[in-house]
Amino acid sequence: VPICFTSARTGAGVQELLDAAIRLLPNPAEGNPPEFLKGEGDSAEPVTVQADTDQHVVGHVFKIINDPYVGKLSVFRLYQGTVRRDTQLYIGDGRKPFKVGHLFKLFGKDHSEIDEGIAGDICAVAKVEEIHYDAVLHDSHDEDHFHLRPVAMPSAMFGLAIEPATRGQEQKLSTALHKLGEEDPCLRIEHHAELNETVMMGLGDLHLRVMLERLRDRFGVDVQTRPPRIAYRETVSMQAEGHHRHKKQTGGAGQFGEVSLRVRPLERDAGFQFVDAVVGGAIPHNLIPAVEKGVHQVLHGGAIAGYPLQDIEVTVHDGKHHPVDSKEVAFVTAGKKAFLDAIAKARPILLEPIVLMEVTVPEHYMGDVTTSLAGKRGRINGTDSIKGGEIVIQAQVPQAEIGEFPTELKAMTQGQGRYSMELSHYDPVPAQVQKQLMDAWSPKAEED
């Protein structure tokens, strides 16, 4: 097997590599084209394309470039057929074709417009927003449902929360992130609405540093970064009663509302239930939604550390009202503070997300990795040996402990380890962690 040594920094050896490719690699007519599939799942049938310029067009998009002058460039390898200006092409299973307006050939950073591309060429079309990475381009519905076998991409597990350094650049940042995500299939952008943060997920620290440089140099967006927040939850661990009387007199019409309610814990992941058990008109029926609104304000904003509550049932069973002063705002406040009163008596606890991890490493690194996971409050569920002398370790680990794991895994396994994870469930946090989170919370002061 020929081995060529090159330097990306100095360019040494690059010309020799290109000469070797021309001399040793087969041309498109002689090479073995990839096997396309038609259909989905187990019923997909293999289809072999031919490097024939007279056949239907079949091309595969393998790169997206957002050029500052030309716009979006979709780079594709043409496996079959001929593409010219004004050729009509379909994107995947799309029913509406687009017309090729400008066809380019790329030469590094430069590109030149061409009249046609033939089987074997690498071409690009400009300003077709619907095209995406891994799309198949074709000129006949005979090639609908064509696709290549998916390339196994490494999972993006290293995250940074980002926000613009300058206020007012939120939309500019959003547009830039969308374009970066189009170009790099290993980059994942997540928006966590409940935490009000945008997280950029990549393959590692170096990958994300490159993305941050591109944001600054190509799109003119400077950002601030920090570790992503953990989506903790609050709940209660026992049943308790809560009560509050809201009475306010300011010279004119006053405010009056009194609410008694009960909270009790539900099974994990049961969510939230609100029960109206008021009888005898103690709280008028039309004011019950106001009580629920007050409860929901606490539910979303938190009671002990500022995180949403879950797995809790609230039953409103009694109260008092005034024929003149009982307004919606009074029962919103009474419901909210009665709920807070009940939570304080119901042994509130914090829950943390537990992720299910699968860590794949060479067998001789298993001991180091399992020790590391155990040190992160992880629980090893089992191990499986797979081909190639590797072993898969299944473990449940608190998400809060994962932050530095990608870097540690790389160091422990000399870059040979990889992992995936998904949310498993929520568990109570240790007492010292709960105290730290509660001490760090500064609830907004409110008028009574």
Image: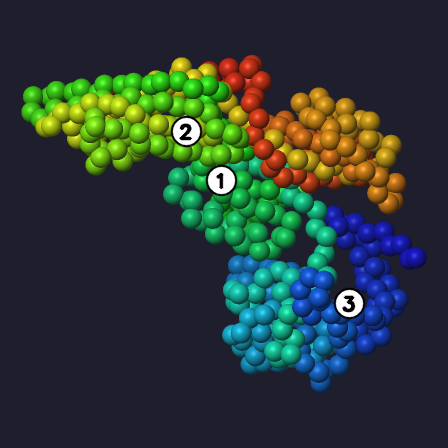
Label 2 or label 1, whichever lies nearer to me, is 2
The residue positioned 58% from the left and 33% from the top of the image is: 425
Label 2 or label 3, whichever lies nearer to me, is 2
Q: How many marks?
A: 3
Give SS at disc 3: loop
Instruction: State the separation of the CA atoms marked 2 and 3.
Output: 57 Å
Q: Amino acid at mark 1?
A: His
Tell me, for residue 313, which label it has, or none.
2
Q: Earlier in the sequence, mark 3 or mark 1?
A: 3
Other-residue count near label 1 (Cα within 10 Å), few / some / many at <14 / 14–19 / ≥20: some
Question: Which residue is the site of mark 1?
Answer: 192
Q: Amino acid at mark 2?
A: Glu
Q: Amino acid at mark 3?
A: Pro
Instruction: State the separation of the CA atoms marked 2 and 1.
Output: 25 Å
Nearer to us in this view, 250 or 103: 250
Instruction: State the separation of the CA atoms marked 3 and 1.
Output: 39 Å
Question: Are the residues tagged 2 and 3 within 8 Å (C-beta)?
Answer: no
Give SS at disc 1: strand
What x and y, as percent, mark residue 322?
13, 25
Quarter of the image holding residue 33? bottom right
Extreme residue in the front direction? 280
The residue positioned 57% from the left and 37% from the top of the image is: 160
Q: Earlier in the sequence, mark 2 or mark 3?
A: 3
Question: Which residue is the site of mark 3?
Answer: 34
